[in-house]
Image (cartoon, grey):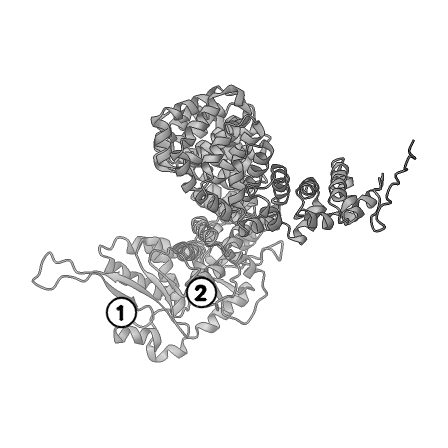
């Protein structure tokens, strides 16, 4: 028997490490394994990290802190497909964290990710690479990077991937990218429409929804809408609306259709195929607020085109929108109101809404939702523009009160459009008076102070619309509205400044308001505006003219000229020439000043003082001196001294003094509104002139007679060589001292020079209806200009000559008429 031989096992080579199984529960240890050169270790480490990161955001942050992202970035390009796949899976899920995305942008990973979207790459890598890109494409900078690195084309190609996750991530990434206009234009050239339409047939709702959202964004461009129509996209969208099981897609489908309806060609195409009727019918039966809202928005977009408005009106879209106003959802009401506003550009629609929709819109003005209120009032503004019948319908629907209340709301759009509606309604006098009775001018004071230029403009325009009524102007004046109106003249906004000038022009139609506007500085601002070629407008020039025409004291002091249409009334005073920018004080303010050595202020008042009984019951036998109480000292003393008349018995004088004293004791002059004292002598002048001059047959005779009358009352004719001996200055000084005032009634002046006589001539001529102008010259000169028609040449009959302008001599040869530009006229004015 042979001997058995024992076989010995050879020991392993000394340089080979025997396999070692490691079980680690520390993430840090596994992250360190990502640096291993062994594919198997790397694959298992990536798999473990993937499971760890999937458990929550905190784990992602922990891995970020351990430096996992930088190591994984290297591994997504590893030559081993399993390592590359597992690393990409971790990348995809970790990119959902904000801090991780920030680091990925710093590492500029987009180019590496896009390189893995090639067809030969593993589908799992496609899935997680597109997932990572979708997470990162939320940021604008990443969108730009993907676009510039040509990422759109591989993403669009992956829309046809058989893997739904790849498709979902790709379409989501494209949806985020097309938010930027560059990508939106590029996807159209890359033929993205057909694959997106194919995705609408997907069995996965999330993919369908993302495809619709992408179509909604890119269909904002007209070129895309054309391509969509050419690829039967409209039919696909309508089929979605007709399918009840796709009700979760209806809102987005409507949004895409809304974009498509902006084009007339598309609108006509949908109408021809019956799609428009289906769409309106669908909206009518739907009870989903989001669908109703989006339908109204689609109509509003389409109504931006005139031809579309016509088509929609022919399909009775008005009834659809009116019904939507009744829906108990604020968003639907807002959208329906906006659609009505857009459709108002069509006259047929405007009439239709006027018959049915206005009451519903007026009701919405009382809504607690400010956005609803604003949308409703915008619709009413459009409905009432150039439509008196609709304006009347608003009043009939009891819309005036809520409109006035809307002027106090906080939303600028609501205030501006409420003012616009009221302005439209004010074109009809009955409505204007009705609105005015609700105190609209008082309410407008706040909108005039608004920080919004749009509100300022509309408010000023509304003031202009209502300011034609005297009561309305008084209300605005008493409410303090003139101040903010004048401030708007400073506005840098052209429309605000224009409308403010318009409002000032209208409000300056009466003397009280014109004086107040001047006091607030409107005159100086308007003069400044009119000196600027860039800021001047037609209304600024008209406002300045109207302001001066209704404040003749200011006009004469500033411009030194009153035309024949500027009729001097009671309360006028000649302060003398003032420098530009100097404020002219009121007569009341001037009456408070102490007696001073300055030019006398000549005032006009041929109206009895109604609040002083003694004046009203003035005995006919009293002289001028007896009946003129000291004119401008009523606020300085409680009693007025009655000057003793000449030729009166002592008993009569004492009785008259007692009567006056008793009356003054009964009247507390401090509580009576200040009024200038009456000028009874001027009243006598006017009465006498009426009796003697009016009966004359020709204007020429009346002018000559009045000139002689005025000269007689002012010291008679003066020889030219003895003009310097005519001591009118001393006479005026004596009157000032007598009255203890700088203000002198013109009837007290018995020795008057050029400008006194010219003023008296103008005052009486205006009362008698004789047209004449008043001109201030230099060195106390002043004259009147009249226009008279000369007689026809001898032997010529029926020839009507144009009127000639004459200057009336009131000093040297009273009644002498000098032709304008003649030597005599120049001598009268300057020598």
Residue 169 appears at what percent x and percent y? Answer: 59, 37
- Residue wearing tag 2: 558
Total numbered labels: 2
| Residue at screen point 48% across, 73% down | 730
Give the structural element (helix, strand or loop) at label 1: loop
Give the structural element (helix, strand or loop) at label 2: helix
Q: Height in image: 94 above or below 634?
A: above
Quadrant (top left/top right/bottom left/bottom right) for the N terminus: top right
Q: Earlier in the sequence, mark 2 or mark 1?
A: 2
Tell me if I can see residue 822 in this picture. Answer: yes
Q: Residue furthest front?
A: 1
Q: Quadrant of residue 806?
A: bottom left
| Residue at screen point 54% across, 67% down | 737
Judge from the rendering whether residue 224 lies leftward or rightward of residue 402; answer left or right. Answer: left
> Marks 2 and 1: which is nearer the front?
2
- Residue wearing tag 1: 820
Residue 417 appears at what percent x and percent y? Answer: 49, 39
Q: Quadrant of residue 469?
A: top left
Please state which of residues 20 and 400 is positioned toward the viewer in this rendering.
20
Q: Are marks 2 and 1 in contact (CB under 8 Å)?
A: no
Judge from the rendering whether residue 716 lies leftward or rightward of residue 200; answer left or right. Answer: left
Q: Height in image: 269 above or below 697?
A: above
Quadrant (top left/top right/bottom left/bottom right) for the C terminus: bottom left
Please state which of residues 744 and 163 is positioned toward the viewer in this rendering.
163
């Amino acid at each position: 028997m042979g001997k058995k031989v024992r076989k010995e096992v050879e020991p392993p080579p000394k340089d080979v490490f025997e396999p070692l199984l490691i079980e680690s529960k520390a993430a840090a240890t596994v992250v360190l394994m990502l640096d291993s050169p062994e594919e198997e270790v790397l694959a298992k480490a990536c798999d473990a990290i993937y499971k760890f990161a999937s458990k929550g955001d905190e784990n992602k942050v922990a891995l970020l802190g351990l430096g996992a992202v930088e190591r994984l970035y290297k591994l997504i390009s590893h030559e081993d497909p399993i390592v590359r796949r597992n690393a990409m899976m971790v990348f995809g899920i970790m990119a959902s964290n904000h801090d991780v995305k920030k680091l990925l942008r710093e590492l500029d990973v987009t180019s590496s990710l896009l390189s893995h979207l090639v067809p030969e790459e593993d589908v799992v890598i496609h899935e997680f690479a597109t997932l990572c890109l979708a997470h990162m494409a939320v940021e604008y900078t990443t969108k730009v990077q993907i676009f510039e690195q040509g990422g759109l084309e591989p993403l669009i190609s992956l829309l046809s991937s058989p893997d739904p996750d790849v498709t979902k991530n790709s379409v989501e990434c494209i949806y985020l990218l097309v938010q930027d206009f560059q990508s939106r234009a590029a996807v159209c050239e890359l033929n993205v429409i057909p694959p997106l339409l194919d995705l609408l047939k997907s069995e996965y709702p999330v993919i369908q929804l993302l495809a619709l959202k992408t179509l909604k964004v890119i269909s904002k461009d007209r070129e895309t809408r054309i391509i969509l129509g050419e690829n039967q996209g409209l039919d696909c969208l309508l089929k979605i609306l007709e399918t009840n099981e796709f009700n979760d897609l209806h809102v987005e489908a409507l949004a895409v259709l809304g974009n498509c309806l902006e084009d007339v060609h598309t609108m006509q195409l949908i109408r021809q195929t019956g799609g428009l009727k289906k769409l309106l019918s669908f909206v009518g039966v739907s009870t989903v607020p989001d669908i109703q809202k989006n339908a109204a928005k689609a109509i509003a977009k389409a109504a931006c085109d005139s031809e579309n408005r016509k088509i929609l009106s022919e399909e009775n879209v008005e009834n659809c929108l009116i019904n939507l106003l009744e829906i108990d959802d604020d968003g639907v009401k807002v959208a329906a109101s906006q659609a009505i506003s857009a459709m108002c550009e069509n006259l047929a629609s405007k009439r239709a809404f006027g018959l049915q929709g206005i009451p519903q819109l007026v009701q919405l003005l009382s809504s607690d939702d400010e956005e609803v209120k604003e949308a409703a009032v915008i619709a009413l503004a459009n409905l009432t523009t150039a439509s008196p019948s609709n304006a009347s319908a608003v009043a009939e629907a009891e819309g005036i009160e809520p409109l006035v209340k809307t002027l106090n709301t906080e939303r600028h759009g609501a205030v501006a459009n409420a003012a616009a509606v009221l302005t439209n309604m004010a074109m009809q006098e009955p409505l204007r008076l009705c609105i005015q009775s609700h105190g609209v001018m008082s309410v407008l004071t706040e909108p005039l102070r608004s920080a919004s230029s749009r509100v300022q403009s509309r408010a000023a325009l509304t003031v202009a619309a209502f300011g034609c009524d005297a009561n309305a102007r008084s209300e605005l004046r008493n409410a303090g509205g003139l101040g903010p109106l004048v401030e708007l003249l400073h506005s840098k906004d052209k429309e605000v400044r224009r409308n403010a000038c318009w409002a000032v022009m209208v409000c300056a139609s009466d003397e009280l308001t014109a004086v107040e506007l001047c006091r607030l500085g409107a005159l100086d601002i308007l003069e400044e505006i009119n000196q600027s070629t860039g800021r001047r407008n037609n209304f600024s020039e008209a406002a300045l003219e109207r302001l001066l025409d209704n404040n003749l004291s200011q006009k004469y002091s500033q411009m030194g000229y009153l035309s024949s249409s500027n009729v001097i009334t009671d309360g006028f005073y000649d302060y003398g020439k003032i420098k530009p920018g100097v404020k002219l004080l009121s007569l009341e303010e001037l009456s408070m000043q102490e007696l001073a050595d300055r030019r006398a202020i000549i005032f006009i008042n041929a109206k009895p003082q109604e609040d002083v009984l003694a004046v009203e019951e003035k005995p006919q036998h009293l002289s001028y001196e007896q009946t003129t109480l000291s004119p401008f000292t009523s606020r300085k003393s409680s009693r007025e001294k009655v000057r003793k008349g000449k030729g009166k018995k002592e008993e009569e004088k004492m009785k008259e003094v007692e009567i006056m004293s008793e009356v003054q004791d009964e009247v507390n002059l401090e509580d009576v509104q200040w009024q200038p004292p009456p000028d009874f002598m001027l009243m006598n002048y006017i009465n006498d002139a009426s009796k003697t001059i009016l009966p004359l047959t020709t204007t020429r005779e009346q002018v000559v007679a009045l000139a002689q009358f005025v000269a007689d009352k002012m010291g008679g004719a003066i020889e030219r060589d003895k003009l310097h001996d005519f001591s009118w200055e001393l006479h005026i000084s004596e009157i000032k001292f007598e009255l203890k005032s700088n203000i002198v009634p013109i009837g007290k002046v018995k020795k008057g020079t050029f400008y006194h006589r010219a003023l008296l001539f103008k005052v009486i001529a205006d009362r008698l209806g004789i047209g004449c102008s008043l001109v201030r010259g230099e060195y106390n000169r002043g004259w009147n200009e009249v226009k008279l028609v000369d007689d026809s040449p001898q032997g010529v009959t029926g020839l009507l000559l144009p009127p000639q302008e004459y200057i009336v001599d009131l000093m040297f040869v009273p009644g002498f008429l000098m032709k304008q530009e003649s030597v005599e006229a120049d001598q009268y004015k300057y020598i």
